[in-house]
Amino acid sequence: MNPQHFSQLAETLIPSEIVKLGAAIKEKIKAGEHIYNYTIGDFDSSLFPIPDYLMKEIINAYKEGYTNYPSAEGELDLRVALAGFLEKKEGLSYSPSEILIACGGRPLIYSIFRSIVDKGDKVIYPVPSWNNNHYTHFTEGVHVQIKTSPENNFLPTASQIAPYLKDATLLALCSPLNPTGTSFSKKELEAICDLVIAENESRADGAKKLYLLYDQIYWTLTFGEAQHYNPVSLRPKMKHYTVFVDGISKAFAATGVRVGWSMGPQELISKMKGINSHIGSWAPMAEQKATARFLSNEKEVDDYLKFFKSEVEYRLTHLYKGFDQLKNEGLPVNAIEPKAAIYLSVQIDLKGKKTKSGKQLSSQEEVTDYILSEAKLALVPFGSFGYDKESNWYRLSVGCCKKEDIENVINNLRNALQLLS
Ligand SMILES: Cc1ncc(COP(=O)(O)O)c(C=O)c1O
């Protein structure tokens, strides 16, 4: 047995697999290979700059001397601006005391888990999904994974969730979903909310509640017919049981600016605040001031989203069309029509095929490597999001995709697929 030098948690925590994959690709790029790196859920800032207004206000706020500790719950002007923004854009009514600010979505998710989940509590989450497995590990919760399928756009259904709700403490859902770029239909989300309400109403007074963590960090990015729905607007009673995760990271291509927020029942928000303040995971003061000013300026927000959404949608739809074309040519690929976020779900079914050199691709890892080395295309397998390691579905992220590269990517992939027998 290996000696254990650190805590059980540290010794058993799996570092982010996407970050690990990204590092390996960066090495290849450094070594001079031209890789189309569509793995990371981030943005090339030369293609997707943050809103100019936000940038200017960040600089102004530093010049104005906003360089101190912010208040533990987040600066009041930002929470007031957010209350107005949520009301106007989503019809959600939250008071500033029901809103908590942190340095992005991650510390909020962490403090939600920490505030709700005790060792041995059941946490229900779908796979594939982003990082729920790691947060459940942090809290020593019992993982209840709902395996989703392409037929349901990789979203969990109410009937899949229903059998596990008894005694569960947390249901962690995300829509639009990372990694799939798909989002809940109104009907399915309503059915899930009805289950959560019924389960809570059946619990004895004083028993732990079943909370819904609703991560909607991509909610502004829906395309075509797709619409974003949230539990509280659909079923107002859900306000007692829902805690949202949101922020500027994805909605305004501002992953490095580090401003996120949660809305939820005041008593839960207050516990999360306690945890976050010990960690010190506040959003920087100047960024909070600037975000408050930006979100209060509806024209700046709308103008930015118009530009941003059309740029993302162009890439997603053209890549989708490319995959569809390859499929129509009889090649073993597939894709789900893009609906939301910055992701496309693509399927590459090459296991068992032989390369030019006669080597058989016998695992999905070998397929991923083949696509990387032969088509110069880097994608994240759904296996990195808690799904089967041998699944042939991948996440394609367009945050670093240049429009002029799309044709080359599809041609490269075609050539790589045609070399197999
Ligand atoms: C679904 C989802 N939620 C939350 C986050 C965390 O966002 P942040 O960068 O604000 O911590 C991410 C980041 O990739 C995400 O994909």
Image (spheres, grey):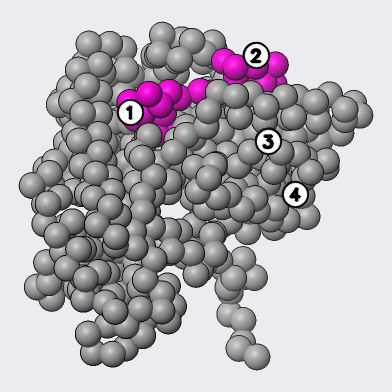
Q: Which residue is mark 3?
A: 158
Q: Which residue is mark 1?
A: 223
Q: Nearer the viewer, mark 4 or mark 1?
A: 1
Q: Residue 160 bears which disc, if any? A: none
Q: Which residues are magenta?
A: 217-240
Q: Quadrant of the N terminus?
A: bottom right
* Tag nearer the camera, 3 or 2: 3
Left/right placement of residue 176 relative to residue 196 reads left
Q: Are marks 4 and 3 in contact (CB under 8 Å)?
A: no
From mark 1 to mark 2, how far is it between C-alphas? 26 Å
- From the viewer's perspective, is the residue at label 4 or at label 3 nearer? 3
Disc 1 + disc 3, Cβ < 8 Å = no
Whether residue 120 is situated above or below residue 173 in the rendered picture: below
Q: Position of residue 102 (x, y in %)?
A: 45, 35
Q: Amino acid at mark 1?
A: Phe
Say whether residue 171 is left or right of residue 204.
left
Amino acid type at image mark 2: Pro
Instruction: Tell me which numbered mark, 2 or 4, is placed earlier along the sequence.
Output: 4
For label 3, the SS is helix
What is the spatial separation of the Cα atoms under label 3 and label 2, in whole angstroms?
Answer: 18 Å
Please name the predominant secondary structure of the magenta segment in the image. loop
CA distance for labels 2 and 4: 25 Å
Q: Residue at label 2?
A: 236
Q: CA distance from mark 4 to mark 3?
A: 17 Å
Above-or-below relation of 268 to 303? below
**Nearer to us: label 1 or label 2:** 1
Work out whether residue 193 or residue 246 is closer to the camera in this orientation and state it.
193
